[in-house]
Image: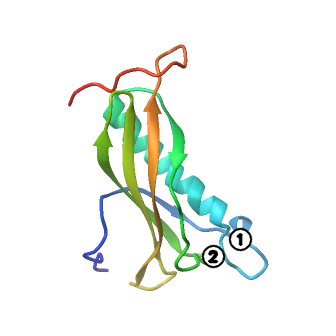
């Protein structure tokens, strides 16, 4: 399978879309897709912050194509901005179609994560 050249970011999470995540027509719930994107954002931001992070904002998300049962959801993340306590990531969700070599972009959004200390208060993101 060849990876589309217009994907932004690095592969951060891959997971299989299962029947429990779908409606009666076999379409995966948008909330499930968004949750996977949030997980990937948390993984990437926690690595960059060297610690705990939480989601504070997600920009507009438009679903361009459905994800179906059996598709592999591939989440790509790219850090686009690091503030004093926040990390902004561009996140893309792509569906690798079941038993095919086809990859389709499903949706994208900006996720804003904030680094927290052990007391749950915002803390500075370390310099690289």
Tell me where residue 78 appears, x and y as whole percent.
32, 53
53, above or below 58, in the image: above
Q: Secondary structure at mark 1?
A: loop
Way the structure is coloured: rainbow
Q: Nearer the viewer, residue 25 or 114?
A: 114
Please name the residue shown 52% across and 78% down the image: 64
Residue 69: image tag = 2
Please name the residue shown 35% across and 22% down the image: 124
Residue 82 occupies quadrant: top left
Tell me where residue 104 appears, x and y as whole percent.
43, 79
Q: How many marks?
A: 2
Please name the residue shown 45% across and 39% down the image: 113
**Of pointers 2 and 1, the one earlier in the residue sequence:** 1
Q: What residue is pinned by disc 1?
A: 22
Most distant residue in the top direction: 119
Q: Quadrant of the C terminus?
A: top left
45, above or below 61, in the image: above
Question: Is disc 2 surrounded by few (<14), some (14 to 19) or many (20+) residues within 10 Å?
Answer: many
Q: Quadrant of the N terminus?
A: bottom left
Residues tagged 2 and 1 counted as in contact (Cβ below 8 A): yes
27, above or below 17, in the image: below
């Amino acid at each position: 399978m060849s990876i589309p050249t217009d994907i932004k970011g690095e592969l951060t999470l891959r997971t299989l879309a299962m029947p429990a995540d779908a409606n009666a027509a076999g379409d995966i719930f948008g909330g499930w897709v968004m949750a996977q994107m949030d997980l990937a954002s948390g993984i990437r931001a926690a690595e960059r912050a060297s610690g705990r992070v939480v989601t504070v904002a997600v920009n507009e998300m438009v679903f361009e194509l459905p994800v179906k049962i059996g598709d592999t959801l591939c989440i790509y993340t790219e850090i686009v901005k690091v503030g004093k306590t926040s990390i902004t990531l561009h996140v893309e969700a792509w569906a690798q179609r079941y038993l095919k070599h086809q990859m389709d972009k499903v949706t994208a959004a900006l996720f804003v994560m904030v680094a927290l200390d052990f007391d749950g208060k915002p803390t500075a993101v370390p310099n690289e």
